[in-house]
Image (tube, helix red, strand yellow):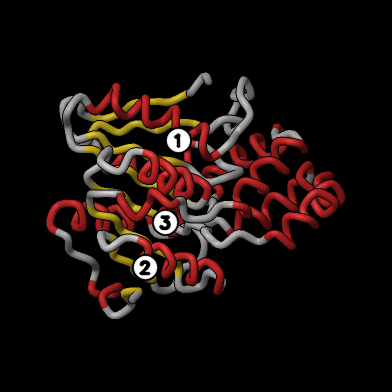
């Protein structure tokens, strides 16, 4: 597998690896990269995401295997922090399940872990019918709004959306809606923060609770006033929350009353 990635920050500092969601790419972490300059930030592009990245077909397991190799190569004995969003969070969960001692901290944002076999059966015909809409800017603007993608990044999002192939979209969505918590997740060490937006749907909140109940190292919080896309919707809040939690285990006051039990 050819794994594309970019590096930023202090290469002697702890390693902080960011995994983007489905249908977007590494640019979704730009506000985090600019903030965490005192860390060694690595931002991979998952297969079939981003420009010119179609050498390998995407799967959660294969992506996790390749990312484990990359992390082991780059960390060189330093602390490792994994941060994922949506599809990227599912990959983080897979990494933790396959290599329980790999990371010191993990932040899992908006991860779906409840498979939907009924939806999977309907997925292909639905996507084949709706796929032509992806080419229309008005449709992409509606999609971008749900993900809190600002005007600054819309053109990049639209360009990548138009570039995505039909079979890629089906494959990525099938991986997403079929994912469940692997058996090995319960053995994952390190501290794990699970977040979900207050405005996300019920299955996402139930998924967050499933993760909390699957590993005693997990802390779970509902982020108030936001839907699917905390790091894009509230980047300053997300950055401060991430740093304080990594440094001393603190959570924002707004989240303390919304911890997931």
Q: Which sits earlier in the primary sequence, circle 1 or circle 2?
A: 1
For residue 160, above or below residue 201 = above
Secondary structure under tag 1 reads helix
State the image coordinates of residue 15 (x, y, percent, origin top left): 25, 34
Task: Give x and y (percent) for residue 190.
Answer: 22, 49
Residue drawn 62% across the image and 20% down it: 55
Question: Can residue 238 be spotted in the picture?
Answer: yes
The residue pinned by badge 1 equals 64
**Residue at the far front in the pictured view:** 183
Residues packed near mark 1 inside 10 Å, few (<14), some (14 to 19) or many (20 plus):
many
**77 to the left or right of 86:** left
User: For the residues marked 2 and 3, what is the alpha-carbon distance in whole angstroms?
Assistant: 16 Å
Camera-side residue of 20 and 240:
20
Residue at (69, 49) in percent of width and height: 140
Disc 1 vs disc 3: which is toward the camera?
1
Q: Name the element at disc 3.
A: strand
> For residue 213, which numbered disc appears in the image?
2
Residue 101 x %, y %: 25, 41
Asked if residue 46 lies left or right of residue 12, the reply is right
- Quadrant location of residue 114? bottom right
**Label whose residue precedes the other's in the sequence (1 or 3):** 1
Q: CA distance from mark 1 to mark 2?
A: 22 Å
- Name which residue lies at 17% across and 60% down: 249
Q: On the image, numbered disc 3 is attached to which residue?
A: 109
Q: Is residue 52 left or right of residue 260?
A: right
């Amino acid at each position: 597998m050819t794994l594309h990635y970019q590096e930023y920050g202090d290469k002697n500092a702890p390693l902080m690896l960011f995994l983007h969601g489905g249908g977007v790419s590494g640019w979704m972490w730009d506000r985090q990269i600019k903030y965490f300059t005192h860390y060694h930030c690595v931002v991979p592009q998952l297969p079939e995401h981003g420009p010119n990245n179609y050498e390998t077909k995407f799967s959660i397991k294969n992506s996790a295997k390749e990312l484990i190799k990359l992390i082991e190569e780059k960390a060189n004995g330093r602390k490792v922090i994994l941060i994922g969003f949506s599809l990227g969070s599912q990959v983080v969960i897979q990494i933790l399940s396959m290599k329980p001692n790999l990371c010191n901290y993990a932040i899992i944002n908006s991860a779906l872990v409840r498979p939907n076999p009924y939806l999977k059966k309907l997925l292909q015909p639905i996507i084949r019918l709706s796929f032509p809409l992806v080419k229309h800017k008005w449709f992409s603007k509606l999609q971008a709004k749900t993900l809190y993608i600002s005007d600054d990044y819309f053109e990049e999002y639209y360009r990548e959306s138009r570039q995505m192939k039909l079979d890629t979209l089906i494959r990525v969505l099938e991986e997403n809606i079929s994912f469940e918590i692997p058996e090995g997740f319960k053995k994952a060490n390190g501290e794990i923060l699970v977040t979900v937006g207050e405005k996300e749907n019920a299955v996402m909140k139930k998924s967050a609770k499933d993760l909390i109940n699957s590993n005693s190292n997990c802390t779970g919080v509902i982020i108030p006033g936001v839907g699917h896309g905390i790091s894009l919707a509230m980047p300053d809040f997300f950055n401060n929350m991430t740093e304080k939690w990594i440094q001393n285990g603190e959570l924002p006051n707004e989240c303390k009353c919304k911890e997931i039990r």
